[in-house]
Amino acid sequence: MTKEPTISRRGALGGLSAAGALTLAGWPTPAAASSAREALITVMGTSDLHGHCLNWDYYKNTTYSDANGDHIGIAKAAALVKEIRAERGHNNTLLFDSGDTIQGAPLATYYSVVEPITDTGETHPMARAMNALDYDAITLGNHEFNYGIDHLDTWISQMRAPALAANAVHHGTDDPAYKPYALKRMKVDCTNRPGTQPLTIGVLGLTNPGSAIWDRHHVHGHLEFRDLIESARHWVPLMRARGADIVIVSAHAGDSGTSSYQGDIPVENASAMVAEQVPGIDAILFGHAHREVPERFVTNTETGERVLMTMPSFWGRRLSVMDLALRREHGRWKVISKNALTLNTNTVEEDPQIAALVADQHATTVAYVNQVVATSARELSAAQACWTDTAIVDFVHKVQIDTVTAALTGTPEADLPVVSIAAPFSRSAVFPAGDLSIRDIAALYIYDNTLLGSVLTGARLRAYLEHSARYYKQVPATGTVDPADLTNADDIPDYSCDQLAGVDYELDVSRPAGQRVTSLTLNGTPVTDDQRFVVAVNNYRQSGGGAFPHITDAPVVYNAQREIRQALIDHATAVGVIDPADFHDVNWRLVRQGAPIFT
């Protein structure tokens, strides 16, 4: 009997021969493979593509590149998918995605916001690409809900693959709002006999419960999001009863067992908990956490069986590949061994079919983001925005304060001081001196957030700042401070380094977290605990993202669903010249015993 090829564990570093075909030697063959295995199924997976079809950086207007040499885009992953199908046989391969597909890259934003598919009838570029690649099923990620249910429904209607989300139910019911699972009935090529044999693989889709918080304004009163573990415990036995020989979960949830929010919302990153607590699952493709997990095994506490897990990074950087060796026992297929790895998409050229399908939409997006809308009086950079007050972040504050202040005219809150909350989303953002394009502004504000105005007291504003100041590591009271040794304490991301404009404050980072706000003033006068402010804040933060205190239950006095990025673009277009002299005010600083650390 001919030995089956196996995928190399070099996957993340290469895995291709000079001729371009996959070199599938080197992945340890299961001990039972040569004699006991009757079929080999290869399951491929993508996740967190975030609208990236091509290996293109729309913010820099050039081919994508990063310090790790990674490439991005579904067109890259497609080339690997097609090579694996060619080697393993289409009968014995499957392709899934675990969510966050239609939000992120400007290509996706254009067809969701600028010319939304709900208005134009245009096919979304991700639908074009994924249909061409013949996905077997996709799972809905939390970002699928960013543009509302109608937009999501339109995209789902354009997809040929079933869109799954077993734990999303219609409000007030137990009725699934989307397909909970799919059964793939296959005729697989066997290794020990001629012809094919029937095999049914079930895939269960689980979306992230955090959507109830992050997109509350879209889903409240329409959808509810149940616990991943409880949902899987309900559906997996039903899938088995309805003929699934093999059960794979595609979950838009990380594996840490933690959540970025508080309250009674089910656990955000529960994939490993599902593997551990729900019997009957053979493997899990998971996402959401934007990490690369080539292979992880979790032992189910009820059965003792090991569940295979894999996560393929994000934006199409990697393709997860799982091999399941099967044997028939008592008339049913059983997995007798399994392995997984991730393949690096920088080892292949973009698939020309996918590139051609989205070429016109890509060109439209490139032309849009390269429109010049203003002039920048000088270069403004976000490189140091995480530890110093920078003009480029103050530009966001300026627009947010102006927008909310204007909207409050004639309201009971018109006389309250307006404070803006914003974070440095990208340290690489730059406004070049001279022509300022839409892509320059989009590179500064990379998320599709909307603007709200909420009322906070001085005491709650201080508590909010203390929470944000957890981002900094505690440093000695004397000596030099390297920003690299100061930021991202406990892996807190830059987008949780919230900064305020409209008040003046100091953070003493030589003190423990929770005791760092040493000065908080308005116009030179200390802010009192009962003093009231209107805070301009994005919808992600206001809905609970990052678990910042008090903001979710603060009274909302402005919510016009104004997209912040578009407000920045409109402001730049209206004023014509972006001059930091008009808005930059150094109102916060990091200190030690009152002495500024950076000047």
Image (tube, rainbow, N blue to C red):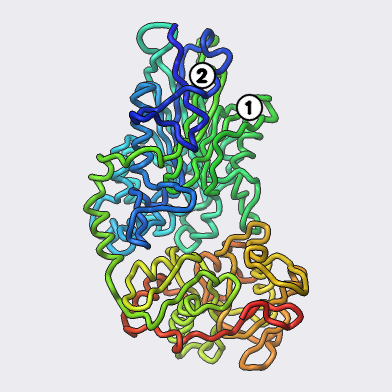
Q: Quadrant of residue 301?
A: top right
Residue at image x 48%, y 82%?
Answer: 401
Residue 325's label in the rendered image is 2
Pick the residue in front: 62 or 274: 62
Q: Which residue is mark 1?
A: 306
Q: Is residue 237 visible?
A: no
In the rendered structure, which amino acid carries the disc numbered 1?
Arg
* Mark 1 Cα-neighbour bin, 10 Å: few <14, some 14–19, many ≥20: some
Residue drawn where x is 56% and y is 88% of the image: 417
Residue 521 on image: x %, y % = 66, 88
Residue 465 or 304: which is nearer the viewer?
Answer: 465
Mark 1 element type:
strand
Q: Is residue 39 above or below residue 206?
A: above
Please state the horizontal and vertical placement of residue 447, each as a whole percent of the image: 45, 63
**Which residue is drawn at the image coordinates 56% and 27% (left, top)?**
282
* Viewport quadrant of the N terminus: top left
Q: Earlier in the sequence, mark 2 or mark 1?
A: 1
Residue 355 appears in which quarter of the rendering?
top left
From where the camera sits, is residue 541 visible? Answer: yes
Mark 2 Cα within 10 Å, few/some/many (few <14, many 20+)? many
Residue 133 placed where, x, y %? 32, 37
Q: Are marks 2 and 1 in contact (CB under 8 Å)?
A: no
Q: Picture coordinates of residue 245 (x, y %)?
A: 49, 21
Q: From the viewer's perspective, tell me whether residue 510 is left or right of residue 11.
A: right
